[in-house]
Amino acid sequence: MIKKTKRENLKELFLKMKADKELPLRETATKLVFGAGTAEAEIMLIGEGPGRWEDEKGMPFVGNSGKFLDQLLHSIKLPREEVFITNVVNYRPPENRDPLPEEIEAFRPYIDKMIEIIKPKIIITLGRFSMAKFIPGVRISDVHGKARVVKWGKRNLTVIPMYHPAAGLRNGEMKRRTIEDFSNVPEMLSEVIENEVEQIEVEQMELV
């Protein structure tokens, strides 16, 4: 049997999600906003939910928040095409309201599967709703920009909570902190890769 590529697995997941008539918010939204970027991404960004522009275009982060996110990625020389971006809910909540706990839960199996397929080295959460998926019970003002290793299935996953780009557009201080937090991402990624290499070397030594 030929093993499917990550891209093929993501496409299959997209079609399954699109056909799922049980998903909430489907009836009031225009398009499914599955995600965008490369299936080979080392960094995955997870926001809260699509807004008006995202709902129209079927792509995540294409409005004003998306422009700021593009600036943040550009500041660390990381093109949008080299990451993968999605949200904790993939249909737009009416009037851009916050996603409800039961809505987040309904989309959870799909988001978990995306993570399983892509296997990113780092997940950057954008906003408190995606942060709570990995690091519940904390305030984003206390933990933003700080990498944390969480147990995710059978592997460890490095999660970096950050403010949602929309918050940075509304608040100058949050914008400054977000720019600063993003500036540390390349170093954090290098550390994760270095730790992985060291772990592989230790495992190989133990097999000898």
Image (tube, grey):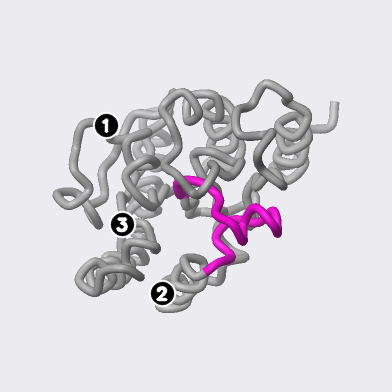
- Is disc 3 placed on a helix, strand or loop? loop
Name the residue located 47 percent from the left edge and 77 percent from the top edge: 74
User: Is residue 182 placed above or below 47 in the rendered structure?
Assistant: below
Residue 111 appears in view: yes
| Image location of residue 206, percent across then percent down | 36, 29
The amino acid beneath tag 1 is: Pro
> What distance separates the C-alpha of mark 3 from that of mark 1?
15 Å
User: Is residue 136 placed above or below 123 in the rendered structure?
Assistant: above
The residue that label 1 is drawn on is 136
Q: Nearer the viewer, mark 1 or mark 2?
A: 1
| Image location of residue 168, percent across then percent down | 32, 67
The amino acid beneath tag 2 is: Ile
- Is disc 2 placed on a helix, strand or loop? loop
Residue 208 appears in view: no
- Depth order, front residue of 65/200: 65
40 magenta-colored: no
Name the residue located 65 percent from the left edge and 38 percent from the top edge: 28
> What distance separates the C-alpha of mark 1 from that of mark 2?
28 Å
Indicate the quadrant containing the N terminus: top left, top right, bottom left or bottom right. Answer: top right
The residue that label 3 is drawn on is 163
Query: What are the residue bounds of the magenta stretch?
Result: 46-63
> What distance separates the C-alpha of mark 3 from that of mark 2?
17 Å
